[in-house]
Each structure stands twice: as structure tokens, then as C-alpha cells.
């Protein structure tokens, strides 16, 4: 018995669809993931201990903005000057509460940090921060996500002004919750 002619095109279409699915299954969410930005944001924080109430002392990694600690508890680290030295203070160190927000001092250059580790973050101790220092930062768990996960970013301290009591840094964060890749123009697999 001969195979009907219409099966050959159907088999070809089916094989093509299977191949496309196999490729897509490598990262089925790739279409929905944003790339790590190529241009860093810049932020300035004011000393938590002495700044005016209206001046932001903390940074929210998830929303990518400086925030006032009197208006929100949704932040990940703050800036303070203690005994004449500038420090970045993780949320749990400042509030005596539990959170996943943390920092790691990196030995890499800002551009050299291509991926964030998932463990090893300082959660409960302030870290000294001087111009040129590079940190990898992990946010608190993002409550807006279906799956509990953190956002990862890298920062470089650009300036500490002890007279004005400010700290300026630039930051590049991965917009995808749980994705540790920090190389601009790319994203990881979820």
C-alpha cells in the first residue's frame, strides 16, 4: 500500500514544529526576559544619621530608586557616616529584622562583574564604602512576583562627600527576578 501524498508535507511541518519547540524549550521564558541595561543609573544617597528628612538615605534595588526611610520600608541598603567613615548598611543591619537584602564587596572592576553569586552576602553588618569600591547587591524578596525571588545588581561608588554627607554611585541591575547575570545586553535562563 502506498503512503498518501498529503502525509509527506504534514510530516515535514510536524518535524519543523518539533525542532522549533526543542529550540524554544531550552529557555521557554527567553521571549519575556529583559536584558541587563548597557547604561548604568546614577544615584545619590544622603547620610541616614544627619540628613534632612526629605533627603533619601536608602536605595530600593527592585524599583531602582533612592527612597526615604520614613516613607517606605521597601529598600535594600542605606548610606551612613559613622565615626567619619562612609558605610553601606543592609536592611537587616539597620532595622534589626530579617531579610535577604545583602551586599558583597567585589575584587572585580564594575565592568568585570558579569554574574552575581547566590550566596555569601553580608546581611547584618555595615560595609565600608569608598570611591572606586564595587559591590554586588541582592534585593529583598520581590513581593510582586509569583515566585519568591530577589533582584541582583552591581554598584560602583563614584563619590563620597563628607562635607555634604552624600554618597554617589552608579548601578546596573538585572530586571529579571532571580536572574544573576549582570553582563550588559544579556540575560540568563530562568
Image: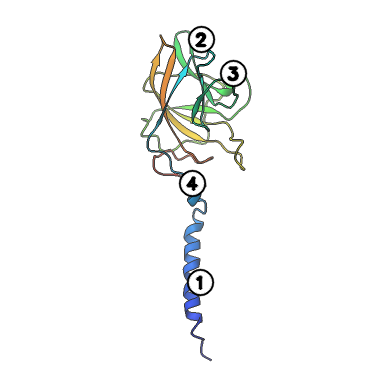
Whichever of callouts 4 and 3 sits on the residue coming sooner in the sequence is 4
Within-10-Å neighbours for mark 1: few <14, some 14–19, many 20+: few
Q: Which mark is residue 33?
A: 4
- Give x and y (percent) for residue 176: 51, 41
Picture layout, residue 2 above or below residue 59? below
Q: Which residue is mark 2?
A: 50
Q: In the image shown, does 180 or 40 lie closer to the viewer?
A: 40
From the image, state whether disc 3 or disc 2 is nearer to you.
Answer: 3
Whichever of callouts 1 and 2 sits on the residue coming sooner in the sequence is 1
Within-10-Å neighbours for mark 3: few <14, some 14–19, many 20+: few
How far is mark 4 from mark 3, CA to CA? 33 Å
From the image, state whether disc 1 or disc 2 is nearer to you.
Answer: 2
Contact between labelled residues 2 and 1, with CB atoms less than 8 Å apart: no
Q: Is residue 96 left or right of residue 46?
A: right
Within-10-Å neighbours for mark 2: few <14, some 14–19, many 20+: few
Q: Residue at x 51, y 12 (%)?
A: 52
Dot 4 falls on a residue whose secondary structure is loop
Q: Which residue is mark 1?
A: 14
Q: Which mark is residue 78?
A: none
Q: Which residue is mark 3?
A: 70
Colour convention of the picture: rainbow
Dot 2 falls on a residue whose secondary structure is loop
- Give x and y (percent) for residue 133: 39, 23
Whichever of callouts 4 and 1 sits on the residue coming sooner in the sequence is 1
Question: How many labels were placed on the picture?
Answer: 4
Contact between labelled residues 2 and 4, with CB atoms less than 8 Å apart: no
Q: Residue at x 45, y 40 (%)?
A: 181
Q: Residue at x 41, y 44 (%)?
A: 186
Whichever of callouts 3 and 2 sits on the residue coming sooner in the sequence is 2
Within-10-Å neighbours for mark 4: few <14, some 14–19, many 20+: some
The extreme right residue here reads 97
Amino acid at each position: 500500500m502506498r503512503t498518501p501524498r498529503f502525509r509527506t508535507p504534514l510530516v515535514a511541518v510536524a518535524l519543523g514544529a518539533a525542532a522549533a519547540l526543542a529550540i524554544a524549550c531550552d529557555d521557554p521564558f527567553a521571549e519575556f526576559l529583559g536584558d541587563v541595561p548597557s547604561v548604568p543609573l546614577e544615584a545619590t544617597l544622603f547620610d541616614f544619621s544627619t540628613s534632612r528628612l526629605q533627603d533619601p538615605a536608602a536605595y530600593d534595588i527592585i524599583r531602582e530608586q533612592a527612597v526615604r526611610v520614613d516613607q517606605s520600608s521597601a529598600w535594600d541598603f542605606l548610606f551612613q557616616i559613622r565615626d567619619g567613615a562612609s558605610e553601606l548598611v543592609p536592611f537587616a543591619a539597620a532595622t534589626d529584622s530579617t531579610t535577604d537584602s545583602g551586599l558583597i564587596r567585589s575584587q572585580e572592576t564594575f565592568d568585570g562583574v558579569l554574574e552575581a553569586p547566590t550566596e555569601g552576602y553580608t546581611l547584618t553588618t555595615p560595609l565600608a564604602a569608598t570611591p572606586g569600591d564595587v559591590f554586588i547587591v541582592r534585593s529583598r524578596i520581590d513581593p510582586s512576583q509569583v515566585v519568591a525571588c530577589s533582584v541582583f545588581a552591581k554598584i560602583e561608588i563614584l563619590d563620597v562627600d563628607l562635607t555634604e554627607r552624600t554618597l554617589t554611585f552608579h548601578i546596573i541591575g538585572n530586571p529579571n527576578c532571580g536572574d544573576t547575570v549582570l553582563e550588559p545586553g544579556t540575560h540568563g535562563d530562568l
